[in-house]
Amino acid sequence: MTRTQAKLKHTLAELDGAGRTIDDARTLYELGRDENDEATLREALAQIDVAEAQIGKLEFRRMLSGEFDGKDAIMSINAGAGGVDSQDWADMLLRMYSRWGERMGFGVKLMDVQEAEQAGIRSAEIVFEGEFAYGYLRAEIGVHRLVRISPFDANARRQTSFASVMVVPDIGETDDIDVEVKETDLRVDKYRAGGKGGQHVNKTDSAVRLTHIPTGIVVACQAERSQHKNYATAMRMLKARLWDLERQKREAKMAELRGEERSIEWGSQIRSYVLQPYRQVNDHRTGTKLGNVDAVLDGDLEPLMEAFLLGKGSAQTAADDDEV
C-alpha cells in the first residue's frame, strides 16, 4: 500500500509539473503577443514543447499500468527454423536484450543457456530485475526474423533465420497468486553447470532442470553455485510460466466468447531485422521502420517498444469505450 501511494504521489507531482509548464507557456505567449516580443513568443513555444514531452511521458507511463507491468521479467529465447544461423541469431538476441537491460538500468541475470555445437545458442533464460521490466518487455513477445548473408554459408547466400521470445512476469513468492505445482507432476534433473570453460565451470551437479509433465514446460537454472538456490529459482520460473499459460487460456476463452480473432503469438512474425539486401528493422504490428539496425541490435529498443505499447493502449481504450 505504501509503495502504491508513493507511485500515485509521484504521478500527481508530474501532472502538476506539466500543468505548471502549460500555464507558464500561456503566460509567456500572452506577454509576447501584447508586447510584440518575438523572443518571448519563442520561449513560449519552447515551453509548449517541454509540456508535450512531459505529457507524452505520462501517456506512455499509463501504458504500463497493467497488473504485473511493474514486476521483474523472465525472458526465454529459443532458436527456431534456420539451423546454425538461427542459433547464432538467438545469441544475437540474447546480447541485444542484455544490452537493452543494461541501458535501462535493470539488473540482468542469465539463469540458463544451452549453447549450440557450431555457433550460437539453442536457448536462454534471462531475468530482468527492475521496475516496469515486464511492462516494457511484453512488447517483445513473439517470433523475430533475421535476413542476412549467412556467415556460415561458403557460397555467401542470403539466409532467413527465426527465433522466438517469450516473456512472463516474475510473480515471486509473496503475491496472492495460487499456482500449485505437485511433486508428482515434476521431473527434476540435476546436472553440472556449463559455461565458457575455466574457473567458471561448475565442478558439482548444481544446475537444476524442471520439467512439468502435464504441460511439457521446461525451465532450468544454473546461475547460482548452490543447487538449493537454483532449484528455488527454477521453481519460481516454472510458476511464472504456468501462471502465464493459464492467462493465455483465459484470454483465448474470452476472445472466443466475444467472437474475436487473435493471432497465435508463437506463429506470428512480429518483427524483421533485415541486413541484406537493404538495412532496416520493421515492426509488423505497428509499421515502425528504423534504418539504424546496428543501434537496435546494440539494445536501442525503446522506439519499437513505445510504438507497440502506445498502440496497444489506444486499442484497449477504444475497446473499453465500445463496451461502455
Image (cartoon, rainbow, N blue to C red):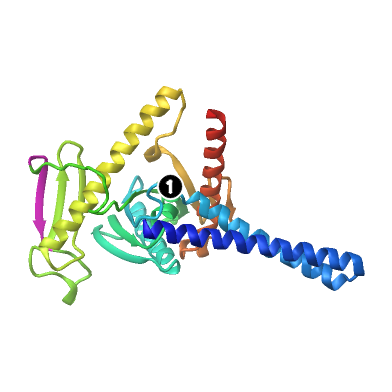
From the viewer's perspective, is residue 215 above or below residue 64? above
Name the side, left or right, on which 250 lies relative to 180: right
From the viewer's perspective, is residue 150 above or below residue 185? below
Percent coordinates x, y for residue 12 in the rendering:
54, 59
Q: What residue type is labelled 1?
A: Gly
| Residue 56 seen in the figure | yes
Picture mark count: 1
Percent coordinates x, y for residue 156 in the rendering:
44, 56
Residue drawn at x 33%, y 51% is 169
Name the side, left or right, on which 270 lies relative to 17: left
Percent coordinates x, y for residue 301 in the rendering:
49, 59
Quarter assignment of residue 73: bottom left
From the viewer's perspective, is residue 179 above or below residue 108? above
Q: Name the residue under label 1.
A: 66
Residue sitting nearer the eye, 298 or 258? 258
Residue drawn at x 15%, y 53% is 209
Residue drawn at x 57%, y 62% is 14
Residue sitting nearer the eye, 188 or 238? 238
Where is the N terminus found, in terms of image quarters?
Answer: bottom left
Question: What is the span of residues highlighted in magenta in the rendered image?
Answer: 184-192
Q: Is residue 290 magenta?
A: no
Percent coordinates x, y for residue 274 in the rendering:
51, 53
Quarter assignment of residue 268: top left
Residue sitting nearer the eye, 313 or 144? 313
